[in-house]
Amino acid sequence: MRKNPIRLLLGGVIVSFGLSSSLLAQAQQQVSNAQVAAMVEALRRAAPQTGSANDGLYSEWQVKPETLKGWSKSCLKRELTPTQFENSPAIARQVVSCITRRELNQQLRATSNNETAAVRGVACWWMTGSYTGCNSGFTAGYVQKVVGFYQQQRSKSVTPN
């Protein structure tokens, strides 16, 4: 029995399209705006308060000036001065949201979509520059605060059916 080459070709295209669509959907999976907003707010609320106005950290998120330069260039395509960042809560939130979205996406992929593990990774990275190693001391307490604030924010953004 001879198979119809057009049917074989069409079948292959359909299977190929189905596979590439599911792979594309996985690759494009993005965190929701609600997840980003919850993470941004959690980081803001957990930001360490040094008690000093001139502590070298800027905005409600307590960002270092050298960090701010790279983040603003990446997110806004221009460098902000610490004063610009400090004096514009809207711009500060925009930059922090941009970076948080990037990091949360990366950590969700790395943790197979384990939201709590991803939040822990981002919180640890935010404080130390590393996604791991925040299991004791000050950094562990900070990560726990971020996770708690994140969960509070997420529970507010979920609407009952």
Image: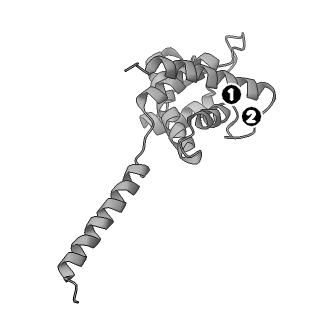
* Residue nearer the viewer, 47 or 24: 24
Residue 26: x and y in percent read 42, 50
Could you tell me the amino acid type at mark 1?
Val
Q: Which mark is residue 143?
A: 1
Residue 134 lies in quadrant: top right
Residue 15: x and y in percent read 31, 66
Q: Residue furthest bottom?
A: 1
* Residue nearer the viewer, 48 or 146: 146
Q: Residues within 10 Å of mark 2 (few under 14, many from 20)?
A: many
Residue 117 lies in quadrant: top right
User: Is 78 on the left-hand or right-hand side of 4?
Assistant: right
- Residue tagged by mark 2? 134
Q: CA distance from mark 1 to mark 2?
A: 7 Å
Could you tell me the amino acid type at mark 2?
Cys
Q: Is residue 75 above or below residue 149?
A: below
Is residue 111 at all visible to an observer of this figure? Answer: yes
Q: Earlier in the sequence, mark 1 or mark 2?
A: 2
**Quarter placement of the C terminus:** top left
| Mark 2: secondary structure | loop
